[in-house]
Image (cartoon, helix red, strand yellow):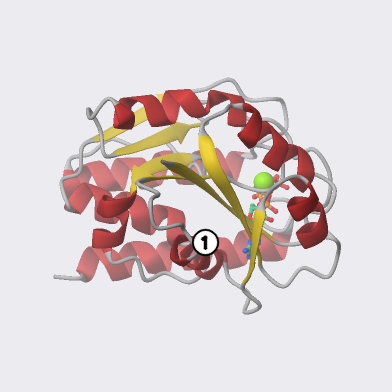
Amino acid sequence: MISVVIPALNEEEPIAAVVRDCLATGLPAEVIVVDNGSTDRTAERAQAAGAKVVSEPTPGYGRACAAGVRALSADCDLVVFLDGDGSDCPELMPLLVDPIRRGEQDFVIGSRTRGKRERGSMNFQQVFAGRAAGWLLRLLYGVSYSDMCPFRAIRREALEKLGMKEQTYGWNLEMQMRAARARLRILEVPVNHRCRTGGESKVSGTLRGTFVAGIRIIATLFRVAMER
Ligand SMILES: Nc1nc2c(ncn2[C@@H]2O[C@H](COP(=O)(O)OP(=O)(O)OP(=O)(O)O)[C@@H](O)[C@H]2O)c(=O)[nH]1
Ligand SMILES: [Mg+2]
């Protein structure tokens, strides 16, 4: 059984379509939207579109993702993550989940840098950071990534064994590092990426967001790399 987890902070405009597009694939049995202290109607709209809404009032991207994992129903065995801003393409979900369902992979991650990107959907820093992280992880673990794409699928059992700790923006990178270190079977597939379909950017579109996320990602890289 497939579950989708979507961390969301003030995404009232795009969230309903994201949830509906996930359900329209016919793949997930549940779509969990983790409302991370939104002050708008994100929670109501997600619920009206068919999501199970979980509230995680303490801010933090990783904390929200972890809250979503804790809320998974007992029979879920495959988890898909994506953003709540409409920038990922839920219709491509089969590319991520099929290799896992066939028993060939444990972790399948999208790559926006290898896919078709709508103009303006990723800035230079994001593309560069994804490539640079991929290069470092190849040196550290011998696994090639080209992005820190939020759209990804992983076997639940494998995820729960990774021991994820990051509470904020380093979550995506931490999962990639731990998956590589745990020698999971990993596949990267090109995915298309769009500009967010409404609402406001919290991360790459703002100077503060870029700075905070950058610091957290670098801190995560060091922390996980130094762990024994
Ligand atoms: N739970 C949680 N989610 C967050 C937080 N900040 C951002 N998000 C979500 O993380 C995703 C990525 O944030 P965005 O604002 O889209 O950042 P971005 O993709 O760099 O910027 P855009 O170019 O505007 O898409 C979205 O689904 C946000 O709702 C946060 O502090 N907590
Ligand atoms: Mg975004």
Residue at the image position 54 percent from the left and 24 percent from the top: 92
Front-lying residue, 166 or 154: 154
Instruction: Please tell me whether mark 1 sits on a helix, a strand or a loop.
Output: helix
Furthest residue in direction bottom, as rendered: 58
Quarter of the image for residue 102 reads: top left
Instruction: For residue 190, say whether it is visible.
Output: no
Q: Which residue is label 1 attached to? A: 68
In the image, taking residue 18 as reference, residue 161 lies left or right, namely left
- The total of numbered circles placed on residues is 1
Choose between 88 and 131: the one closer to the eye: 88
Residue 204 in the image: state x and y as whole percent.
66, 51
With 133 as the anchor, is 42 left or right in this view? right
Q: Is residue 140 left or right of residue 40?
A: left
In the rendered image, which quarter contains the C terminus?
bottom left
Q: Position of residue 21 (x, y in %)?
A: 68, 32
The residue at 71%/60% (across/down) is 207
Density class for disc 1 (Cα within 10 Å; few <14, some 14-19, many ≥20) is many
Q: Residue furthest front?
A: 75
Quick one: 197 or 41, which is closer to the camera? 41
- What residue type is disc 1 on? Gly
Q: Name the quadrant of the N terminus.
A: top left
Q: Quadrant of residue 119?
A: top right
Placement of 212 over or under 138, stated as above or below: below
Q: Return the residue nearer the eye: 119 or 169.
A: 169
Q: Can the viewer see residue 102 in this picture? A: yes
Residue 172: x %, y % from top left? 44, 53
Location of residue 61 in the rendering, given as x and y in whole percent from the top left corner: 56, 64
| Residue name at image x 78 percent, y 44 percent | 16
